[in-house]
Image (spheres, rainbow, N blue to C red):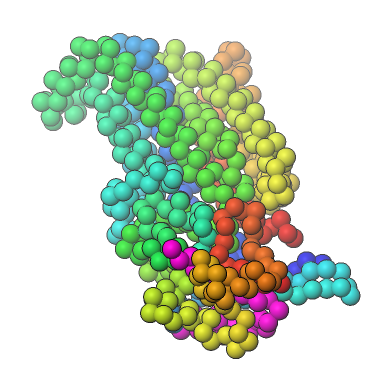
Amino acid sequence: MHELTTTRNNYQIDPVLTVWGWEIPVYLFLGGMVAGMMIISGYFLFKGRQKEPTCSCFYVPWVSLILLSLGMFSLFLDLSHKVYVWRLYTTFKIASPMSWGAWILILVYPVIIANIFIRLPKFVTDKFPGLEKYSKMLTDRPRLIQNIGVANMILGALLGMYTGVLLSSLGARPLWNTSILWLLFLVSGLSGAAAFVHMVAKNIYERELLAKADNGFLTFEIFVIGLMFIGLATSTEVHQEAAQMLLSGSFAPVFWVFVVGIGIIIPLIIQLFAVNHKIQHTPVAPIMVIAGGLILRFVIVNAGQVSHYLNAHF
Amino acid sequence: MARFAMVIDTKKCVGCMDCVVACKTENNVPEGYNRDWITQEAFGNFPNIQLEIRSERCNHCENSPCVSSCPTGASHYHDIGGVVLVNHDECIGCKACVASCPYDARFIHPDGYADKCTFCIHRVEKGDKPACVSVCPTNCMYFGDLEDPNSDVSKLLKSRKWHTLHPEAGTNPHVFYLT
């Protein structure tokens, strides 16, 4: 026998950790979506697609701006000592991914805004006609637009990676403590963003391109999930226990049905038919991908909090 | 430079929880929370069953994940004795430290900041022992400087068998359990 009893019963700590509620998964999901959108928009700018009047690189950064702000608000809601939030920006802690993230988020804003300035919508220029000269300054310089595209891609990749590194650096939670989590969250963010742009794109070429790209991201995501399980299952006992929670434990039904089934496999099949012109493009598959991405963050955050060093002993 | 540590003799601890009550009283720990607690671990096969009773708390690790994960520097090593403390006015309540602790020794205080055992540094700086150590009726708890070879903790760790909690976590904890 091996039995452990404790008198400790701290709120949100015992019997399992529940300090992070809905706010953190939502923040990680929105951060991932924004990261993917920045990479997609940045790629289009790099390729000079801003010459196309219906290019999604004109409206995607607006969506990024709104989602990023919602994500940061969600993160703010999670803080339990809110009046001291400004402390994040009076220091930089090199060992803390959360500190890195706080500063990356600050750098992301100007890069998205630079993308927005390439073509300002009419309601903005009507209200602030003075801004038009900045727009013209950018459109006169295609090389600068390319650089804005590159900056969007780099910062988007950093943002997407950071959402995974934030969790994987917390070694006390074996499920998160896998060095592939950044790749899973980045590719999931890319697939969610590609699904969103595919759904709303006015340009037929971009819609087709993003549907194909999304199929690639979803296929790659399956491989990454497989690699994550191989890594966990061949690691220490606590990591094996953590993998078991998703493979056949209490989180398995939601993981396999909603994340893998509805979030990856089914939309992948639908989109394969769509890109081969067997069926029409509909919003069904993209909505499934986006919902799957959100549920993935909820599963990883919640299951990660349950996974623990103590579990391995019993 | 001092390096404070706590040594707990599991052969003498009876799990009376005096240390828990003393801590709550001394540090005004809110209802529903504990900075220290009693754990009983029973293992073996009948009739060869062993029982270890431990008074547990923050391990004031030398390689503390709570300190490295803190984005504001609120979690830090105190200048005296390397004690791990939280500066309440720098803590934003992000809970990264709570999630990073393999011992689940931290919690979020109802006022919003991360809270945990401080080794009663306010008493130690005045030359007193931590509240839990000072009230233990079986004298199973020892507190002192590991850098001082003549301290109780140094002598006990040299003369007795001991273990720490989850050494595999790589945190180098500074609460030792004599077995």
Q: Exactly how many numbered labels are in the figure?
A: 0
Query: Residue B136's x, y, as percent?
Result: 57, 85
Query: Residue A151 or A300: which is nearer the viewer?
Result: A151
Q: Residue at x 53, y 30 (%)?
A: A187
Q: Residue at x 31, y 63 (%)?
A: B89
Asked if A184 appears above or below B86 in the picture, the reply is above
Asked if B166 appears above or below A253 in the picture, the reply is below
The residue most toward the left is A130
Query: Residue A205 or A173: which is nearer the viewer?
Result: A173
Query: Residue B110's x, y, as percent?
Result: 41, 70
On the image, which quarter does residue A14 sit in? bottom right
Asked if A54 appears above or below A171 in the picture, the reply is above
Query: Does residue B56 appear in this view?
Result: no
Q: Residue at x 39, y 75 (%)?
A: B125
Query: Residue A64 or A7: which is nearer the viewer?
Result: A7
Residue A258 as seen in the image, left or right of residue A286: right
Q: Residue at x 53, y 23 (%)?
A: A214
Query: Residue A291's x, y, as percent?
Result: 53, 38
Query: Does residue A272 appear in this view?
Result: yes
Residue A11 as seen in the image, left or right of residue A64: right
Residue A18 as seen in the image, left or right of residue A48: right
Query: Which stretch did the figure color magenta?
Result: B1-25
Asked if A125 appears above or below A49 in the picture, the reply is below
Does the magenta segment cover residue B133? no
Residue A255 as seen in the image, left or right of residue A152: right
The residue most toward the right is B47
Question: In the picture, which quadrant includes the N terminus of chain A?
Answer: bottom right
Question: In the picture, which quadrant includes the C terminus of chain A?
Answer: bottom right
Query: Residue B8's x, y, as percent?
Result: 62, 75
On the image, which quarter does residue A157 sit in? top left
